[in-house]
Image (cartoon, grey):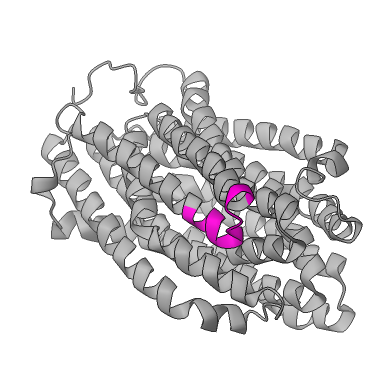
Amino acid sequence: MVLTHHRNNIDMLHGSLFDKILIFALPLAASMMLQQLFNSADVAVVGRFDSPQAMAAVGSNGAAINLMVNLFVGLSIGANVIVARSIGRNDTSGIHDAVHTSITLSLIGGVILVVWGLSAARTLLTLMNTPSDIIELAVVYFRIYFLGAPFIMLYNFGAAILRSKGDSRRPLISLAAGGVINVILNVIFVVGFKMSVAGVAIATVLSNVVSSFMILRWLMLEEAPFTFRPSELMLKRTHAAEILKVGLPAGIQGSLFSISNVCIQTAINGIGSYASAGSAAALNFDFLVYYIVAAFTQAAVTFTSQNFGAGNYRRCDSVFRVTMLAGTGFTGLACLVCWLWCRPLLSVYTTNPEVLHYAEIRMLHVVCFLWMTNFYEISGGCLRGMGHSTLPSVMVLLGCCVLRIVWVYTVFTYYNDFTTLMNVYPLSWLITSIVTLAAYWQIRPKLSM
């Protein structure tokens, strides 16, 4: 066996699935939520101790930042799949080469992001119709944030390697450590030194440095064949090609998602800075709930990849059913909490009545319907685990991205109403879920023939 019975590993090929998927997915969801909570501290601190303009400047950066970051973070899904398949095949040399190729790709991606972020900041934010009273602050935050891009890439690829063998606990620990540092530095830089958005951006960069170094240290201490050695960094053509084959469509999907969200954010910015601030406040809960979906999707990808590599096709079907049931159930509970305690939750970020008005609309019309995204995310994740990454990305492109862009320039242009703009989210999720589930049920039986 490639893997020893280490407490950080999960045997995905044998035994019951439900408990193992929960053991994998819940720490992963917690880590992503924790990361978002610490990132939300950026918005909360400037909202409470600076100004609505500073809050809007930080919050309005989200769509623009994700536009490029998601492309490269998506590649980490490819790293996860390739390492997991090698585990399923007991291919020790394949695991070693995939680990070192993945880290190399993360460094290359990080450098590209730094160059892009520094050069494209003002142009992109101007194209997004960022209000004139916040654009200077938004540019500062954008540029400082991207200085930390290499560390964001290192963390995501390193965490993907650990998760490929079932270890979602240590990525959570590293995020917790970095997040605590982020919150402390936010308070010091903003409240103590009055550094406004520059302070929260610097705090974010430093927290990413801590998290990425912890992940790399753990990989360097791993047992073979997972051990990472800097002197053995490589870019093996076959593994890089496989990572790109699986990860690039997922990354492009994330970027296209961001393009549609950039269009929506542009429309929000056109309504005014209060709408931008309110949307930014509710967006924090959007992320928190969605990360439950993302965690069970990652579980679907990883468990499916290992079992598909081992030829356990019936178990792949069980992975689909369990992750879909658990993901929808846990997400539904989170949506219910957001609906029942909408105003108290949003009041954490702002007490401004105009900002709260827009925040409540986004919470009730978008966040409370996020349970629907399980249907296309998990089915698409299972397809990626079986080597079909392009098709689910195309489905999301058509069902979510294209529809949202068309909506902004047709329906929203006609009504010019914030609520109408938000309603495109549940509509796009419904359409994308239908077509992606249909694709899964058509393709899956053919793969075991």
Magenta segment, principal secondary structure? Answer: helix
The residue located at (57%, 53%) in the rendering is: 193
Name the one closer to the observer, 162 or 141.
141
- Can residue 148 be seen by looking at this rendering? yes
Q: Position of residue 97 (x, y in %)?
A: 15, 46
Q: Position of residue 56 (x, y in %)?
A: 70, 64
**Residue most extreme to the left:** 231
As for residue 156 lying within the magenta part, the answer is: no
Relative to 201, does residue 306 appear above or below in the rendering?
above
Q: Position of residue 89 (x, y in %)?
A: 21, 35
Name the one closer to the observer, 262 or 315.
262
Residue span colored magenta: 191-202
Relative to 209, does residue 403 appear above or below in the rendering?
below
As for residue 201 lying within the magenta part, the answer is: yes
The residue located at (63%, 79%) in the rendering is: 128
In the rendered image, the quadrant that contains the C terminus is top left
In the rendered image, the quadrant that contains the N terminus is top left
Q: On the picture, is 197 further left or further right than 444?
A: right
Relative to 376, does residue 114 appear above or below in the rendering?
below
Name the one closer to the observer, 191 or 118.
191
The residue located at (46%, 79%) in the rendering is: 120
- Can residue 160 be seen by looking at this rendering? no
